[in-house]
Image (cartoon, rainbow, N blue to C red):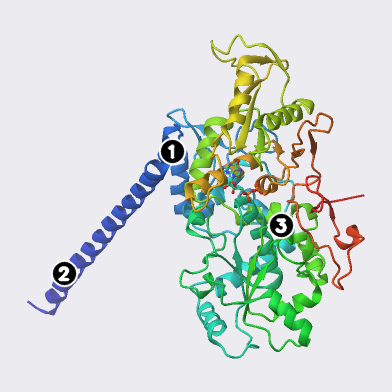
Amino acid sequence: MGPNSMSLRMFLVMFFLVSVVVIGTLTYQNSTFRIFEGFLRSNVQGGTSQNVTTHGFGLRGTIQNIKNESLGKEGGVQNPQGTSQNEGRTKNITKADDGSKTASLTSSHAANLDDKLLGGLLTSGFDGASCISRMQSYLYRKVSPHKPSPYLISKLRNYEEIHASCGPNSRAYDRSMREIEHSKNNGVATMCKYLIWNPVNGLGNQMISLASTFLYAILTERVLLVKLEKDKHGLFCEPFLNSTWILPENSTFWNQNHIETYQVMLDKDRASNSTEDLPLALFVNLQHPFFNPEKIFHCEHTQDLLRKVPLLILQSDQFYVPSLFMTSYFDTEITKMFPEKDTIFHHLGRYLFHPSNEAWELIIGYYETHLANANERIGIQIRVFNPESTPKQEYMDLVLSCTLNHKLLPEIGLPNPMSSTGKNHTASVKAVLVVSLYPEFGDNLRTLYLKKTTVSGEVIQVYQPSHEGNQKFNDKMHNMKAWMDIYLLSLSDVLVTSPFSTFGYAAQGLGNLKPWLLSHVKKNDTHSSTCERDFSSEPCYHMPPKHYCNGKLMKDFVSSFPYSRRCKDFYPGMKLGNNFV
Ligand code: GDP
């Protein structure tokens, strides 16, 4: 055996070893993929989807979507110019083999990335499987006539970079937090600055205040972190690429008792007129002044002070954006970001609030089963604030006269001969989505339209996804149902909402809907109007400031709050609108 046969043998041995490694790796990858696939299937079809399958929701297309999206990221979703029954709504709902309706990805490759990313509002690069709704919401919602401005898009991309470099799990986060927690030097300038949002009240209140706080974070270049308790963890997807917005569990700022309050800072400032003594962390409670004295948060001097504090914990239950216009720098910036002033919650809400996969299954399952086939969808939100003092029948009467007077629903005619015999398959169908804590409203309306025909010949189908009885706390499934209700309402073509309810505000803003606002229920009141059309889809700011920064009572409301008008549903409140003449 010479050197040549030696190297041949070496070559054969090497070839054998490399082959074994390659085959082994491929087999492993395949089985990993199958395990992943199995995981997706069991997650979507079993487990959390118990509710879904009992309603008979077909989710095959959704699973297909998950796989395509996870493999191809955003590029994997196609928009096959579906069969929309309603103008503007881009649907690609097709029939699957088993007859169930699914959002199919297979019918076309004409992916419209711009539609999916909501005109550039959303960034690309997310792993599609982690948040299916982010890339599918455009299939179910009408295309918004409001495009985000290039300036808003650039501010969002800039914010995302700040969040990625200063957010949890970054070195800058660890370093800045260490300095904020331990530095003896109050005036220290940390690498990153933070804004921790503290939730209060129900989901609607939380969504509108969180959107306001996100805008404040963008304006002040702070990293937004949220104290989402466990009962709200599974509701929304992470909104920021490659990072989390949830305040890490080990943060000392979950507890704010040891932190200086905004009120103390203002008092010290008034007494000494010096900014040397500013704390490193500050708790700012902006909850409405029913409970707290006026906050002068919107004043330039206050903002100058706050700019020097590296970490703020902010608590609010309001859509306080209108007051930000009172600070001249914010005014300039917000005006550039939102040339249309009545789209602030609409854009920020659609940017931030994407249903988690678990929530999306419930929402889309319900939508496909009950609402997708209707010619029109009417959402009716009935919020009863004082059930003990006002009989439900008064609310029911109000809803009926509003919807009938304004021809949102047809008048009732003769007894329905089909009610016991079957369905009229040719008539135009209106699906009515009733959303309330109480089952009576959906039940009564359904019974009414089941027993009688309508004078217009339309078929009215009434659905109510849940009836929780009362607001519950620390209950994840309760919050999930609330989120499902808000999202489904936002998919309506026509919306009727209850006055003073932030639950309705969140839905109207996401859906860009100017709702029909029900009047306040007043006992034995037969004269007043039952509802009127709102002038904007923005939330009402219930408790705007009443004083100028010099302490004088505000007289000229309109010049103090540009682009705002009094809310129709709550007197001291104000809301943003566009093109007031
Ligand atoms: P608001 O009190 O009407 O301004 O709305 P919030 O959302 O801030 O608080 C009300 C809370 O009560 C919600 O978060 C839910 O927990 C519950 N709730 C009120 N109305 C409904 C409803 O129609 N459906 C469901 N699922 N929950 C509701």
Numbered disc in front, either 2 or 1:
1
Q: What crowding class fits label 2: few (fewer than 14 Cα within 10 Å), some (14-19), or many (20 or more)?
A: few
> Which residue was labeled with disc 3?
319
Numbered disc in front, either 2 or 3:
3
Q: Amino acid at mark 3?
A: Phe
Q: Which element is circle 2 on?
A: helix
User: Is 575 left or right of 3, judged from the image as shown?
Assistant: right
Gap in angstroms between the C-alphas marked 2 and 1:
57 Å
Q: Disc 3, ligand 1: is the CB inside 8 Å?
A: no
Residue 366 percent across, percent down from the top left:
52, 36
**How many numbered badges does the structure rendering display?**
3
Q: Which element is circle 1 on?
A: helix
User: Is 50 left or right of 377, judged from the image as shown?
Assistant: left
Quadrant housing residue 457: top right
> Which residue was labeled with disc 1?
51
Q: Nearer the viewer, residue 443 or 52?
A: 443
Q: What crowding class fits label 3: few (fewer than 14 Cα within 10 Å), some (14-19), or many (20 or more)?
A: many
Gap in angstroms between the C-alphas marked 1 and 3:
33 Å
> Which residue was labeled with disc 2?
13
Tell whether label 3 touches label 2 (CB within 8 Å).
Answer: no
Residue 517 percent across, percent down from the top left:
76, 39
The correct choice, above or below, for 27 with respect to 144 in the image is below
The correct choice, above or below, for 1 with respect to 386 in the image is below
Q: Quadrant of the N terminus?
A: bottom left
